[in-house]
Amino acid sequence: MNLDLVKKHLRIDAAHDDDLIQVYIDTSTEFVASYLDKVIYDDQAAFDAAEATSSDGVIRNNKIDVAIMQLVGHLYEFREMLDGTGYELCDQLLITDRKVVL
């Protein structure tokens, strides 16, 4: 996902938060991939190269990009978790990495 496009979505011109926004882009991309239960490939060539070893992927498209940008916007706007929404978002982001003890 292109940092400049995400900054345009966020209406940010300055570069002082670029590293933070990139972390949010990476996290949001991982979340969307987890939600889809697929690897997200940037283009057809990357998809074709990976197809030889795995068929569990999708090529990045506008719907995926919008989902990522929406998540980045939410993470950027609500950096501080002060209520239940933050917990719910963390739960959703980390559910696949969480160990459940039964």
Image: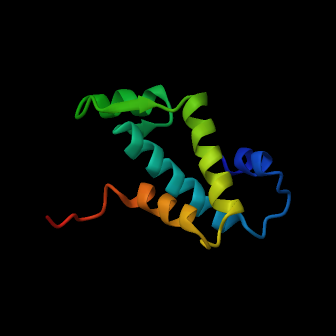
Q: Is residue 73 above or below residue 44?
A: below
Relative to the observer, which residue lies in front, 17 or 94? 94
Quarter of the rendering containing residue 35:
top left
Relative to the observer, which residue lies in front, 48 or 25? 25
User: In this rendering, would 102 be left or right of 44?
Assistant: left
Relative to the observer, which residue lies in front, 76 or 14? 76
User: Percent x, y for residue 47?
Assistant: 39, 30
Q: Is residue 43 above or below residue 72?
A: above
Residue drawn at (68%, 61%) of the image: 76
Relative to the observer, which residue lies in front, 15 or 38? 38
User: Percent x, y for residue 87?
Assistant: 49, 66
Residue drawn at (29%, 32%) of the image: 56
Residue drawn at (46%, 26%) of the image: 44
User: Percent x, y for residue 53?
Assistant: 22, 34
User: Percent x, y for residue 29?
Assistant: 50, 48
User: In this rendering, would 41 be left or right of 4?
Assistant: left
